[in-house]
Amino acid sequence: MKERGLSGLILKASVVITLFIPLLASHATYAQSAPPILLGTAWYPEQWPESRWEADLTLMQQAGIHMVRVAEFAWSRMEPAEGQYDLDWLDRAITAAGKHGIYTVVGTPSAAPPAWLTQKYPETLRIDEEGHRAEHGNRQHFDFANAKYRELARKMAEQMAKRFGHNPYVLGWQIDNEYANESFNPDTHEQFHEWLKARYGTLDNLNARWTTAYWSQTYSDWSQIPIETRYGNPGLLLSWKRFVSDTWRSYQKNQLDVIRANCDPKQFITTNTMGWFDGYDHYTVEQDLDIAAWDDYVGHGHLDPAGNGAAHDLTRGFKRKNFWVMETQPGFVNWHSVNNSLDKGEVRAMAWHAVGHGADAVSYWQWRSALNGQEQYHGTLLGADGNPVPLYSEVQQIGREFEKAGPALAGTSVKSEVAILHSYDSRWAINWQRHNHDYDPVKEIVSYYAPLRAIAQSIDVIAPTAPLAQYKLVVAPGLNVLSDAAAKNLMDYVRGGGHLVLGQRSAMKDDDNALQKERQPGPLAELLGGRVEQYYALDNPVPLEGKWGTSHSKLWAELLSTQAKDVEVLERYGASNGWLDGQPAAITRQVGKGRITYIGAWLDDDAMKSAAKWMTDISGVKPALGPVPDGVEVYPRYGGTHAVYILVNLSKAEQTTSLPSPMRDVLGGGTKNSVTLPVYGVTVVEKKR
Ligand code: GLA
């Protein structure tokens, strides 16, 4: 009865909404014909009667949606009792979507094991750090290291892969959903001991590398080694995180291998990550995947182009190629302190901001809220009544624009002259011992990223062991833990003619989170011709003066010294605690055709802008497009013979930007010498290279 009522409303809705028929063929033929830039949504057909699907898919098609992600929480529907699989309904849903020109990404449901499973195998339930075993009723309640759980998850994934691995409407696979919670079950602890044995070989070696003579921590049996996540020995803390990362990798591989064995190689395999989330080392886990994908939520407030843009670039850096936004908010979320909506136009601006940073898909979570369940207040594209909410028409505009810009953006990717190095080891190490409670390593990264991006208009965020030769400038803010391999990579880069800038707190620790035996920057000190004599957490701002103007360091100050004669002092501290007065705060040295710079202070915004200008000038970095007004973001993507520039106005007023040469207006048509953008306005221009 209820459903009939809903269908009636839907019919009414389709009369009032602007009818939009996608330009592409409405009947999919094969996955490879999917549009280059995809608009998508998370769809949960299992929550609705099949009689409703057609109405949903029609509304999706009318919005220009060409992708649905399905099934990632539908285990109880796909395997209602152990070994009894039912995938017919999902097959019908995928086929029905395909008939509307909508491709599918299939999610494996291991983030939400069914009640029969946890009841029959309670050992698969996760035990948290306080020793509490999870109960059924939420999600992510499994022990990620448990062999039985892995066996059951693998069988489920295998059934799905056998069924859909060659389905022409299936573009790819998402394994699980937002890996997050490690377990502290006895089996996990045992596996940690095995992991330690494999890494350290002998207890003597482990005891030496962790300096366990400290506080009588010396271990004489592997089973004595505890799990610590916050206040333990730094070597133990880092080992646990690396074990967790390797365990997520093997957890993922358990499903990935069986999917790969049963699917068409054209189908990709990914998982959805969470931006800056640091529960595990994403470089470890991502190496087995085909593409990176993340869930981009603003939560409270509005789009922060630097923080969010850096998170896009971080995700792009996992595979060093284009990525997907697998989930993003249709206006607002339900899980923050204030779940305000993005402004009218901001969702569209945010979608283009994502594409500009290299996203090839933007997918809204979720299509329509379940009538019950934990997330009733979350933003959606349809209301509970099955009709479009006000935001639907904005998403429909995005759909139209993605289709229009698709041919120009097809095959393009982001290329940058500047790279920022990011390492989970370093973030963890600093967070465990911040020394100044306001010292946030992500904020440190963004403090460098924001002014550099404003100048260069494109930045890569990559691991310290990634290839660097292509960059004119490589900046490592807070690269606190420096492995031998990373040190070699950086030295080779400088000797090869690159400019390396080390930010404060760099190269203090070795690969076991032990202090380096040389003063910072450890193995790079010789190349720098200078070093850190002492570090100071600041309770009062310290004045700074030099090449980058007069400014202050608020949180942190490192007293630098110069050993080599050819080292130039860029900044000095003013009068403060006596120790720092008049001492170097930033130094640089030319090394052959290359250069190495060390910045020991947390520069304020103005000084950071000047520093970014100095870094880019001296390294020959040019803006990708050219000067733009403040608040206008430029996102370049390059193809073999052409460049596409996306411009988004995130300022509070209309802005006009002159283009360096006439360019084709991809969305509006014609050729443009300049573009005028209203608040949240977007333009896409193209030029031959
Ligand atoms: C995450 C999850 C989704 C949903 C959204 C809500 O990203 O993956 O299932 O809960 O949050 O914002």
Image: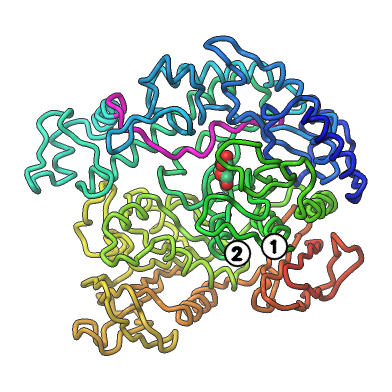
Count of numbered marks: 2
The answer to which quarter of the image holds residue 440 is bottom left
Q: Quadrant of the N terminus?
A: top right
The percent coordinates of residue 662 (x first, y second) are 84, 72
Residue under numbered circle 2: 302
Q: Mark 1 touching mark 2, by CB under 8 A?
A: yes
Q: Image check: 638 left or right of 16?
A: left
Rendered image: mark on residue 627 = none
The percent coordinates of residue 189 (x first, y second) are 27, 29
- Residue 171 among magenta residues: yes
Dot 1 amino acid type: Glu
Q: Residue at x 48, y 33 (%)?
A: 138
Residue under numbered circle 1: 346
Residue in front for this viewpoint, 439 or 457: 439
- Residue 309 among magenta residues: no
Which quadrant contains ligand 1? top right
The percent coordinates of residue 419 (x first, y second) are 52, 60
Highlighted range, magenta: 170-188
The percent coordinates of residue 605 (x first, y second) are 47, 78
Badge 2 crowding class, 10 Å Cα cut-off, few under 14, some 14 to 19, many 20 or more, is some
